[in-house]
Amino acid sequence: TVKSLLREGRDPGWSWRINTALRLLLAFFLVLPLAWWFARALAQPIRSFSKGVDRVGREPGVAPVEVRGPSEIRLAAQAVNDMQARLQRYLNERTGVVGAIAHDLRTPLARLRFHLNDAPEAVRCRGEGEIAEMEAMIAATMDFVQHETRPRT
């Protein structure tokens, strides 16, 4: 006790320091869970936004990022959604152009095949081999276009 400490000649401020340290330690352990909960609540919209953006980067056709949280997060989420829509339009246009080019190449190949009928046997065999290779590339391109334009579920 304080009286026994004073009798022994110890510093009376020592008791006060111990009590203050214990109270600070108690306050720290009482405030720590509240601070932890508050920090998690503040960081949750950022974590959610981060996961949504990561999904957009990995899967271009994924649903848009959820627009919620503080105004800065909502603005960033909306910007990501706008970017995703622009990229999807660009990919659709590019795929359409590739499909149109592949489709249009079939006509000149048909004409070349027709012209090869009058060519000598050696030239006709080599030409038909080249045309078959080009038709295989066109078929692979058309398969790619069909796969890319098919709705995803």
Image: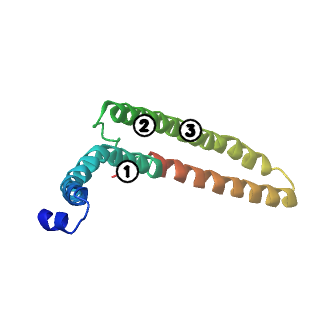
Q: Badge 2 is on which residue?
A: 80
Q: Give the residue type at disc 1.
A: Lys
Q: How far apart are the two marked residues, 2 and 1, measured between alpha carbons? A: 12 Å
Q: Give the residue type at disc 3.
A: Arg
Residue 122 horizontal side relative to residue 5, left or right: right
Q: Badge 1 is on which residue?
A: 51
Q: Quadrant of the N terminus?
A: bottom left
Q: How far apart are the two marked residues, 2 and 3, measured between alpha carbons? A: 21 Å
| Place of residue 59 in the rendered image (x, y in percent of width and height, measured from the top left) | 43, 51
| Place of residue 4 in the rendered image (x, y in percent of width and height, measured from the top left) | 14, 68
Give 31 or 52, whichever is nearer the viewer. Answer: 31
Residue 90 horizontal side relative to residue 151, left or right: right
Q: Earlier in the sequence, mark 2 or mark 3?
A: 2
Q: Give the residue type at disc 2.
A: Val
From the viewer's perspective, is the residue at label 2 or at label 3 nearer?
A: 2
Give 124 or 137, whichever is nearer the viewer. Answer: 137
**What residue lies at 32% left-to-right and 30% top-to-bottom?**
71
The numbered dot on residue 85 is: none
Give 89 or 66, whichever is nearer the viewer. Answer: 66
Q: How far apart are the two marked residues, 1 and 3, measured between alpha carbons? A: 28 Å
Mark 1 Cα-neighbour bin, 10 Å: few <14, some 14–19, many ≥20: few
